[in-house]
Image (cartoon, rainbow, N blue to C red):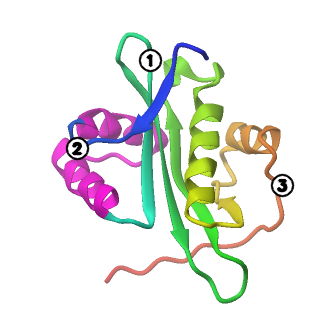
Amino acid sequence: MAEVRIRRARSADAKRVAELSGQLGYPATEKEMKRRLRDVIEDRDAGCLVAVSRDGELVGWIHVSCTPLLEVERRAEVNGLVVDEGARSRGAGALLLAAGEKWARGKRCKGMSVRSNVLRERAHGFYLRNGYEHYKTQKAFRKGL
C-alpha cells in the first residue's frame, strides 16, 4: 500500500480514531477519544501511530505501549490495531504493525506481544503472517475501579 504513510497521531485525529475504534468493537464519542488520545500522546511509554491515505484520509491506527516487566525482558504490547473496513487487506495494517515494532525497538523493548479475541480469526492470520507466533491461550479478567 504505497499510497499510505504512517505518522504519529494528533489530537485532531480523535474523531476518526473514535470511528475506527467503533469498527474494532469499542465505540467511543469524539470527546471521549480526544481525552484518551491526549493521555496516550502524553505518555512517554505509549505510542499511537496512524495510517493516512494519499488523499489524506486516516485509514487505520495502532496503539502500542511499553512495560518493564520482572518475569521477562522489556516488552511492548499492541493495545489496539484497526484498519478501516474498506481499506483492509491492502497493506496498511502491516505498515502500522512494522511502525509499532520500530517504535518499540526505540524504547529498548526486546519483544512485542498482542492479545486478540478468540473470535477474530482473520486477525490471527494477520499476526501469524507478520511473524508472530501463537504461544498461549488464556482467560482475561476485569474489574472496575
| Residue visible at 20% across and 56% down in the picture | 35
Q: Amino acid at mark 2?
A: Ser
Q: Which residue is labeled 3 in the image?
A: 133
- Does residue 116 appear left or right of residue 41 in this picture? right
Closest to the camera, between mark 2 and mark 3, is 2
Q: Which residue is labeled 1 in the image?
A: 53
Q: Name the outermost residue toward the left.
A: 31
| Residue visible at 31% across and 41% down in the picture | 18
Decide: few, some or many residues near mark 3? Use Cα within 10 Å; few <14, some 14-19, many ≥20. Answer: few
Quadrant (top left/top right/bottom left/bottom right) for the N terminus:
top right
Residue 98 image point, x, y percent: 64, 41
Callout 2–callout 3 Cβ contact below 8 Å: no
Quadrant (top left/top right/bottom left/bottom right) for the C terminus:
bottom left
In front of the other: 64 or 29: 64
Decide: few, some or many residues near mark 2? Use Cα within 10 Å; few <14, some 14-19, many ≥20. Answer: some
- Location of residue 58 (image quadrant): top left
Q: Amino acid at mark 3?
A: Glu
Stretch of the chain drawn in magenta: 13-42
- Does residue 82 appear left or right of residue 122 in this picture? left
Q: Name the outermost residue toward the bottom.
A: 70
